[in-house]
Image (cartoon, rainbow, N blue to C red):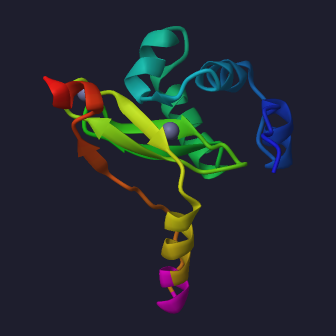
Amino acid sequence: MEIELDIKKILKKNKKKVTSERIDIFDYVVKKHIFDSNELLNKFPEIWRASIFRTINLFLEIWIIRKVKSWKSGDSYELVRWEHSHEHMECWKCWEIISFESDKIYQEINQKAEALWFKIEEKFLNISGKCKKCSKK
Ligand SMILES: [Zn+2]
Ligand SMILES: [Zn+2]
């Protein structure tokens, strides 16, 4: 599926109000890989704190972003890329996040869930360790 990057269209499609705050926040996160709420609070001091959190929740609700667990920054988020999913490996020495893709993992998870009649709503793969650079030290 194509990446839908038109936030106005996405909001309208989901029957949500288009506001300049939502557009500004979207424009910022679309250029980021992983971000957290503190980052948005610092980046947008003019937007009300509650409004930032509401926007994050809204984006989660309509599947624009997903939650990502990070050892370094706790609850973080990233844009959902519809055309493929990826997961992360996080280095606990330099905090570098290395992304990888594997359709096999998802196939396996989906098959297991189906066999167990389990409806997946969220999934996190938490993989941490030492990156190549840090292993050499
Ligand atoms: Zn990612
Ligand atoms: Zn490292």
Q: Which stretch appears magenta?
A: 112-117
Which sits in the foreground, 89 or 120?
89
Q: Quadrant of residue 54?
A: top right
Task: Name the quarter where the C terminus is drawn.
Answer: top left
Measured as percent of width and height from the top left, residue 40 is found at 48, 20
Q: Quadrant of residue 32?
A: top right
Does 46 sit above or below residue 62? above
Measured as percent of width and height from the top left, residue 39 is found at 42, 19
Measured as percent of width and height from the top left, residue 80 is found at 62, 43
Magenta stretch contains residue 18: no
Extreme residue in the front direction? 136
- At 80% from the left and 41% from the top, the residue drawn is 10
- At 41% from the left and 35% from the top, the residue drawn is 98
Measured as percent of width and height from the top left, residue 28 is found at 61, 19
Which sits in the foreground, 136 or 99?
136
Q: Is residue 102 visible?
A: yes
Q: Main secondary structure of the magenta part?
A: helix
- At 38% from the left and 32% from the top, the residue drawn is 97
In the picture provided, is 47 more to the left or to the right than 36?
Answer: right
Does 124 sit above or below residue 72? below
Magenta stretch contains residue 116: yes
Does 80 sit above or below residue 23? below
Extreme residue in the left direction? 137
